[in-house]
Amino acid sequence: MTQGHNGKRIFIADPRDPERMVLSSILGRLGYEISAFSTLEEFLEHLEEQPRLVVLHAALEGAVDRALSLGSAECRVILVDLPPEGSHVFSGFVDATEHVLRGINVRVPEIVMVINDFISPPEGMIRRPPRVAGGYATELRLSGQTIHGHIYNISVTGAFLEVSSPPERDERMELRFQLPHTGELFCCQALSTWRVLPHESAAMRSPPGCGVRFLDLTPEQSALLEDFVERKGRVEP
């Protein structure tokens, strides 16, 4: 167990060994204090430690009722369901800022971003920025090398980049990409905030890659990106 962001503690209760271990590993590398359990009974025995956020898998008997009872200002809750075979979708609930459980669809590479955004939101930001699916080619300029990849999903503030050799956390890079129907070539600096390594990909049901935060979009580019995400989000299921 490692000391986390401002002492923020996360509990993970998931009967699936690979997924539980990989999610614990990624969040631990980000500096969160992680406790992971394979049964609901074991999880309940440690609740007096007062986690800041709980990730519960719906396959655990009683997890749904427990998620509904735990969600509060002091403890945010993500309830994760088994995704359909071959799907890249988690469906479940997140305790929102107003502390009301609401339905969401969370693509697997986003689950860490969800946790980051709710536990340590950017200053002045209350809600997690909406994300939409990508599929657009991108170039990363990193340490004098050009790496080709794809934007797996994107929001106004960042993206998940699908690349075979994801950069280390806190690495700066230059991104070049073009969104369909905008005619705008985006060229900006970005910071790697977390990553899924190739050997973690299968358990996370995610391509290898990294989450990035955009650093220097122009006001015009931010407005274009916001409009793109809003329009695309309205037509996505």
Image (cartoon, grey):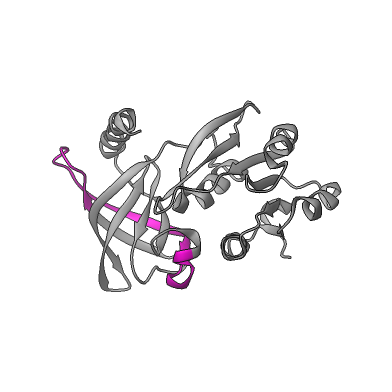
Number of residue marks: 0
25 in relation to 159, above or below: below
What span is colored magenta in the figure?
177-202
Residue 83 image offset from top left, x and y in percent: 48, 48
The answer to whether 42 appears left or right of 121 in the picture is: right
The answer to whether 233 appears left or right of 65 in the picture is: left
Nearer to me, 28 or 44: 44
Within the magenta stretch, is there residue 232?
no
Query: Quick one: quadrant of the C terminus?
Result: top left
Residue 28 image offset from top left, x and y in percent: 63, 63
Asked if residue 64 shows in the view, the reply is: yes
Query: Quick one: quadrant of the N terminus?
Result: bottom right
The residue at 62%/64% (across/down) is 17
Residue 230 image offset from top left, x and y in percent: 33, 30
The residue at 73%/53% (across/down) is 7
The answer to whether 152 appears left or right of 68 in the picture is: left
